[in-house]
Image (cartoon, rainbow, N blue to C red):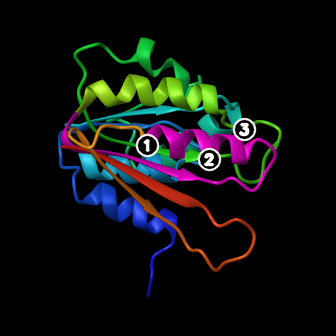
Amino acid sequence: MLQTALHFSHTLLKEVIKEGDSVVDATMGNGNDTAFLAELVGTKGDVYAFDVQEQALTATAKKLTDANLTKQVQLFHQGHETIETVLAKETLITAAIFNLGYLPKSDKTIITTPDTTKQALDALLPRLIPKGRIVLVVYYGHDGGEAELELVQEYCQNLPQEHYSVLTYQFINQRNNPPILFCIEKK
């Protein structure tokens, strides 16, 4: 059976992340990806997780505490556009994940935007190790979603093939704008 974009994102990350790595959850949301990353990197690794909504931080902190995964995670109550200022210049990452759109079961007017997503990608690419991956799951069926999808697609298409491979993964026969996954891998 074909995997959903969300499940496939985890498959792509599991292939490259190992214990002790440093990774980024650019949009922590309800904490599912943050906890997943924390399990992969173990207590010797580092997860840097970002979100602008207090609700996201609260849900993520609870999930991490319940699973005994707090030691390796730093939660930042700020947008992913601040990655450049939060991560030390020498911090190298193995992977990053974005779920772009809005926080499920919350205020649908608070969304990720093309500008902040571009800033985050610009900050992450130079820190990505060879064979490292940045996965973006783009939910675009809301106001502003199409613009962000366009930005991500254009950004990925313009990455030089000598340095990056980019994959897209989507279901093309489903209703209600199923998410589209992009995976950037550094060569």
Going from N to C along the chain, the mark reached first, 3 or 1, is 3
Give the Cα separation between the discs numbered 3 and 2. Answer: 13 Å
Going from N to C along the chain, the mark reached first, 3 or 2, is 3
43 magenta-colored: no
Q: Quadrant of the C terminus?
A: top left
Q: Amino acid at mark 3?
A: Ile
Q: Nearer the viewer, mark 3 or mark 1?
A: 1
CB contact under 8 Å: marks 3 and 1 = no
Give the Cα separation between the discs numbered 3 and 1. Answer: 21 Å
Q: Residues within 10 Å of mark 3 (few under 14, many from 20)?
A: some
Q: Is residue 175 left or right of residue 86?
A: right
Above or below residue 173? Residue 36 is: above
In terms of secondary structure, where does tag 3 sit?
A: loop
Q: Which residues are magenta?
A: 129-157
Q: Is residue 41 left or right of residue 37?
A: left
132 magenta-colored: yes
Q: Is residue 66 visible?
A: no
The answer to which quarter of the image holds residue 124 is: top left
Give the Cα separation between the discs numbered 2 and 1. Answer: 11 Å
Residue linked to disc 3: 111
Residue linked to disc 2: 149
Residue 78: give x, y in percent of width and height: 59, 22
Residue linked to disc 1: 156
Going from N to C along the chain, the mark reached first, 2 or 1, is 2
Q: Amino acid at mark 2?
A: Leu
Which residue is at 60% across, 35% downward? 57
- For the image shown, how many numbered marks are present on the structure? 3
Residue 167: give x, y in percent of width and height: 37, 57
Return the residue nearer the eye: 170 or 35: 170
In terms of secondary structure, where does tag 2 sit?
A: helix
